[in-house]
Image (cartoon, grey):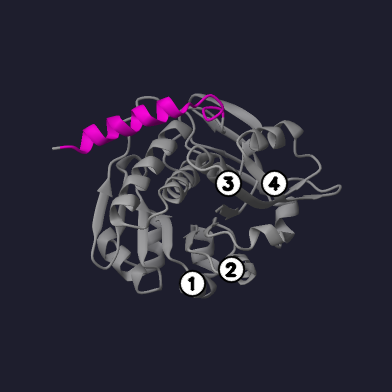
Amino acid sequence: MSILVVGSVALDSVETPFGKIENALGGSATYFSVAASFFYNNIYLVGVVGTDFPKEHVDFLISQGIDLDGLEQIEDGKTFRWGGSYINDLNAAETHFTDLNVFSNFQPKLPKSYQNSPYVFLANINPELQINVLRQMTTPKLVVCDTMNLWIDISQPMLLETLKEVDILILNDAEARQLTGEDNLTRAGKKILTFGPTRVIIKKGEHGAISLTESTFFAAPAYPLTNVVDPTGAGDSFAGGFMGSLATLNSFSEQSIRRSIINGTVIASFNVEDFSLDRQRTLTPQEIGERFRQLEEIVRF
């Protein structure tokens, strides 16, 4: 039993009102896999980096129990780099540069041992690549997909084709409105269900997340933080915590989904407490459990 994640591995330079960091470990697949590893031991990462990717980052990912046989390293290539700031609004990044480098020609190649993974997370890469990944799989039990405003804008037809083969779509509130043309998130979620997924989870940042199917609705609050340092990777950390928890429970019941959404929320709340993945380097199972119990108490009546 394994979770497969396909997405970016990057070096990020980020500035917030609380400081800045240069060439830090980042990328959607990275944040997802580290978050998932707190709940599940068998994480397969597919991505691409250059020879400039620091060995210390590789060692950290391996120390989290993440399998890197699918991480391709391009000789003499440079790793995908992103730079941005959250000076005026911690909910929205201002991008200063995006250097795709080796990621610009990324064609996911799944090792044979990865192809029968029952749980698949397609991070916010080009929908054409997401479809390509699914064509390499055997019979996954659960396919979860993320997307972003760029793909909704320039590749919407291919994205809609991808969604026909997806069980759960995770996206944020702005993306849900952009994809559907609906201002109301409940209507937006219901419309997305007609595109193919059986469930849609809409992230609302500091206001939590909602989950919709044809017959269910669930709203989860965000953890009430007083110290937000760097929001980068929060959405991917949410997805990783969600899928790691779901794989451990090995159940797709509504109760398991809701519990896993809370676990995703918990991991995302830790992620934003420091730059890059620095908070996760010291995070303990005891801290995760305690914050889960605190969130349970918040929603109890």
Kind of residue sitting beneath label 2 = Leu
Kind of residue sitting beneath label 1 = Glu
Tell me the number on the disc at residue 68.
Answer: 4
Asked which secondary structure carries label 1, the reply is loop
Image marks 1 and 2: residues in contact by CB distance under 8 Å:
yes
Asked which secondary structure carries label 2, the reply is helix
Direction left: furthest residue: 301
Q: Position of residue 255 (x, y in %)?
A: 28, 51
Residue designated by label 3: 42
Residue 277: image quadrant is top right
Which of these two is toward me, 92 or 300? 300
Marks 4, 1: nearer the viewer: 4
Kind of residue sitting beneath label 4 = Leu
Kind of residue sitting beneath label 3 = Asn
Residue 215 versus residue 260 in the image, above or below:
below
Residue designated by label 1: 165
